[in-house]
Amino acid sequence: MSSKRSIFVGIDLGTTNSAAAVFDGERVQLIRSAQGSGLLTPSVVRIDARGKVTVGERARRLVDQDPDNVKSEFKRMMGSQQTIAFPAAGLVRKPEELAAEVLRSIREDVKAQTGILPETAVIGVPALFELPQTAATSEAARLAGFERVEIIQEPVASGLGAGFRAAEDVGSFLVYDLGGGTFDVSLLEAREGLLRVVGHDGDNFLGGRDFDAALVDHFIELIRAQSGVTLQRDNPAHAHAFRRLRVAAEDAKIELSRSTEADVFIADIGLQGQSVALSASVERATFESLVAPLIERTITICERLLQSHGLVGAGSVGNVVLVGGPTSIPALRARVAQALGAPFGEGLDAMTLVAEGAAYYAASSGLDARGSGAKEAGAGAPVWLQFPAMSSDLNPFVVGKLVEASSRERISHVVISRTDGGWASAREVVDPDGTFAIMTNLVARRPNTLRIEGYAPNGDGPLLLAPSEFVIVHGVTLGDPPLARSVGVALANNGVRVFFDRGSPLPMRRTFAVRTVETLSPADPEGSLRIPVVQGEFPYAHLCRLVGAIEIKASSLKSPLPVDSLIEVTIELDRGGRLAASGCIPSTGDVFGHVAQLITGKVVPSELAPRIEELRTRLRDTRTKAFKHKAQKAITVLSSAEAMLDDCAIATQRAQGGDQDAGERAQRLLIDADALIAEGEGEIAWPDLDERARSGLTRWAGWIAEYGTAIERQALEETTRAMEKASLARNAREVRHHLATIAHLGNAAAMRSEGAWESELDYQISQITKSRDPKAAAKLVAEGQRAIQVRDKAALEAAVRGLWELAPGTSDKTRGLGHWSGVT
């Protein structure tokens, strides 16, 4: 590849292996690891007693000799508070710091192969990565020395790679991406050169590692039968043995994709003070029976995604693109083919497709890896050009400007032509400031090398320009990617104010108003008000993942911020899903833009088991009621929750034995099981909920129709349709969510009515005994009644707002569930 030509770098930062590709506008080149491990770099890091860092295949080879200081599978922990210890050197590293070592190694491999140390790149992340994990990936790239990176969802990158290679539009297709640690499935559509993501689903804790774990469980039984020794997941003394068994399981899994049998021999599995060997032959049929439940989990997720978009039954998509090492398992391929009834994409490398697609995306984004200082050296007149490196349009524009004033005097016209001789533009006049714009003509589905030449006012030419040539690739480009999980603000009552719904196109920016539930005074220098940002599909904040928080420090205020003060919260997400948030106090104009937290909470293994038992008790009580009411859907949902809790118990044992990744998995399973139990509870209460939804809609719709704004009436119409759809599907969670939105709209409209504040005063009078200060409340009631008599609306409103401030506060327990939110 010529260093004079733009290059675009794409990286697949994988749980087990990582890969990179470089695209120069004409061809894609896969980057080989300098360590002799082919096109893949094992995502493994070793730090020895001297603090020397070894990455990739060399580190992986040392796992038997130095298991305590060789670390892998840290990708699923990125964005968490977990740290990883290297005892020989006495060092502790964050998961993103280890990911940075892998990226730094890849960056050097790109330099060795192309002569260019890349300054920019596109990195793939799982579609269901949460915002802290995405932010951690960007941080890893920064630590590795990249000046700028863009993030692309892995299945989208795979779809872009598959679509770019296709000779024509491929219509609807499914990307089945099973990596070492995560499973993603995406429904995509490629038409008229534009790739559109229709929908996502997946599991951030399902991957090849779990297939290995199934084999490890089998090995444990063999060791018990052969040696009488029982290995325990929750025993830290057995951690070395489990590491060696996992390496043996991964090797056997790979072998069984090629052969019908794999021999496993470990002379000493590494138990402290005891020599125990493992010698066994594993048949492919045995392995397939062990991993069949995991394969079925992926099929269930695929079918759920397709059904959510009205696609039911085999053959509902045109083809399936397989991505990730585990997709080479014959039984998995056969089951996917049977369930989806669609052919697999041909000529695609499941291990490198994400990197290839990321490189194409870098080209479509104009992300030249040479950096901002790259330019072609030459004797010609320098010209600045702006054009799409990749375009789905056959006639994209090229905009340019002659940089030097002397060039503008010598050159009055420019011509752009294809080097294949098939097209040339007319002579385009250069404006006095040196600018011009020319519409090009491209050959479909291929790179187009274009030449640019200048002409003098008297017609002499062509005159040399620098650059003299550039490339525009005609191919598939990516439409706005969708948000994988909803994002909103947690409220003090454990509710969620949703800003962006799942599936909304990125980038996005929205502003909502919230009100404070406590007073914040500059006199309290330690005081602060917290506005948590959460991600998830649940109406309760404690079931959603805390991904950030805006904190308003009391010491930064010029004057006290009373209870019920208005705060405008703005949340912004870029195309890669990176978060920016801010809060503004309209009364003072103060803006607070610091996001105090963008990592998930720390997992404490000892706290997991009690929480599992709490949920089991709740599940049993709910299931008893479900059988009593013959609520079949609730029974089915609760069965899924029970299986999830069983998996959580196993993951908890592993976490107690020192497996940090298992702790993160257990935490996610607890949240998901809690949500399923809540869904079961909602199904049992369905008749009451349905009636509340109907009566609530009738009540609030009247207020909105009479006093609502045009925007509120439109929002009511859209939300009502969504609630009716959820009601037909008997989706209790969605009905509650939409009903809360309608109530919020209705309440805002109702308070504009003539007698609204009088009615609210009457209600507050009925609640005066519950006030935090009954004497002060009685005084405010008297002021409000006098205001009504003299028709002083402002005084009446002030009295009612004062009573709101004295209303019983949200309990500490509820505030805790709402991530200690200070707003409602």
Image (spheres, rainbow, N blue to C red):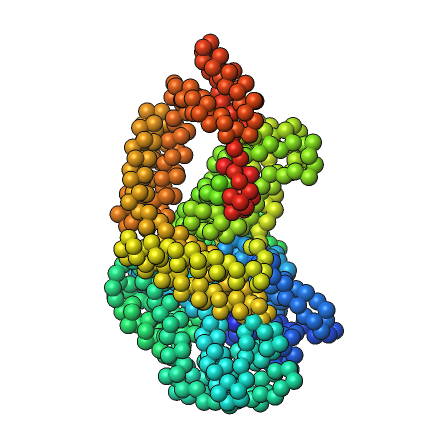
Where, by quadrant of the figure, is residue 476 drawn? Answer: bottom left
Image vertical order of residue 751 relative to residue 578, above or below: above
Indicate left or right for 372 with 475 as reference: right
Q: Nearer the viewer, residue 160 or 558?
A: 558
The structure residue drawn at horizontal position 38% and vertical position 26%, both measured from the top left corner, is 750
Q: Does 539 sit above or below residue 584? A: below
557 horizontally vs 226: left or right: right
Residue 106 position by quadrant: bottom right
In the image, 282 versus 314, the foreground residue is: 282
| Residue plotted at (72% across, 71% down) | 89
Whether residue 197 is visible, yes or no, is no
x, y percent for residue 560: 63, 29
Q: Residue 646 location, x and y as percent?
A: 44, 66
In the rendered structure, the answer to whether residue 736 lies left or right of residue 569 reads: left
- Residue 68 seen from this side: yes
Question: In the depicted view, which residue is nearer to us: 114 or 625?
Answer: 625
Extreme right residue here? Answer: 50
Does residue 638 lie above or below 791 as drawn?
below
Q: Look at 35% across and 47% down and name the residue there.
A: 734
Query: Which corner quadrant holds the N terminus?
Result: bottom right
How many numbered marks does the figure carry?
A: 0
Q: Measured along the vertical axis of the image, is residue 795 above or below residue 519?
A: above
Point out residue 121 in the picture as x, y percentages from the top left corner: 55, 60
Q: What residue appears at the point 40 percent right and 73 percent down from the top-left corner? A: 327
Q: Position of residue 171 (x, y in %)?
A: 30, 60
